[in-house]
């Protein structure tokens, strides 16, 4: 704290949550908490892993297939196009730009950014179980295990939001 004013914190944020039209369908998932009150005291490092690896907008969606422990990211309209290694490489390369952040807010349910409960499809019968972790999120959380990470939807819960920001400020200190 300096002269009674808290310094701005740095947070990583999935680009679609800030209103950037980077999703597969050309839309966004602008989050009012992030672009509203949070933007008053935070600076954002903005990432979209799928655009970061050169996927266009709009584009066919990707989905996770295989086992939840080691799911693969596959273009949904072309089972042969696996972008897992590109997403993992992008995540590892992004870590340098994330050294100064105090937390990361990810897009829930995303096959690249979801931190939990992402649908993983079994290749044999096409059924999905909400047991996976997005490829970018997995690499981020493994590389920076102490970094506070949360999904935007969970921040609607006052207790989870308070817990996340307590962890963010503790991490920043």
Image: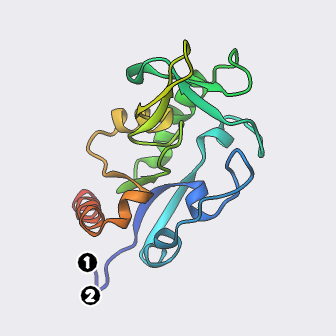
Choose between 136 and 130: the one closer to the eye. Answer: 130
User: In the rendered image, which residue does mark 2 sit on?
Assistant: 4
Q: In what quadrant of the picture does the N terminus appear? A: bottom left
Dot 2, how many residues are within 10 Å of its Cα: few (below 14), some (14-19), or many (20+)? few
Q: Position of residue 60 (x, y in %)?
A: 74, 35
Location of residue 5 with respect to 47 vertically, above or below: below
Q: Can residue 101 be spotted in the picture?
A: no
Position of residue 160 measured from the top left corner of the image (x, y, whole percent):
27, 61
Q: Report if the CB atoms under discs 1 and 2 are less than 8 Å apart.
A: yes
Q: Residue 37: horizontal and vertical position, in percent? A: 44, 78
Answer with the quarter of the image where residue 83 lies: top right
Residue identifier under label 1: 1
Q: Is residue 84 left or right of residue 166?
A: right
Is residue 84 shown left or right of residue 133? right
Q: Quadrant of residue 24?
A: top right
* Quadrant housing the C terminus: bottom left
Q: On the image, which quarter does residue 30 sit in? A: bottom right
Secondary structure under the numbered disc 1 in the rendered image: loop
Residue count near mark 1 (Cα–Cα under 10 Å), binned few <14, some 14–19, many ≥20:
few
């Amino acid at each position: 704290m300096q002269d009674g004013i808290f310094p701005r914190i740095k947070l990583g944020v999935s680009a679609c949550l800030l209103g950037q039209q980077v999703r597969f369908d050309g839309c966004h998932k602008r989050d009012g908490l992030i672009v509203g009150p949070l933007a008053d005291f935070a600076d954002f490092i903005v990432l979209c892993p799928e655009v970061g690896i050169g996927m266009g907008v709009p584009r066919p969606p990707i989905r996770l297939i295989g086992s939840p422990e080691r799911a693969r990211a596959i273009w949904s309209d072309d089972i042969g196009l696996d972008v897992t290694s590109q997403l993992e490489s992008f995540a590892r390369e992004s870590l340098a730009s994330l050294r100064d952040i105090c937390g990361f807010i990810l897009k829930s349910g995303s096959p690249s950014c979801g931190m939990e409960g992402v649908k993983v499809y079994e290749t044999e019968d096409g059924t999905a179980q909400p047991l996976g972790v997005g490829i970018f999120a997995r690499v981020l959380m493994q590389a920076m295990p102490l970094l506070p990470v949360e999904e935007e939807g969970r921040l609607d819960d006052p207790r989870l939001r308070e817990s996340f920001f307590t962890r963010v400020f503790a991490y920043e200190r």
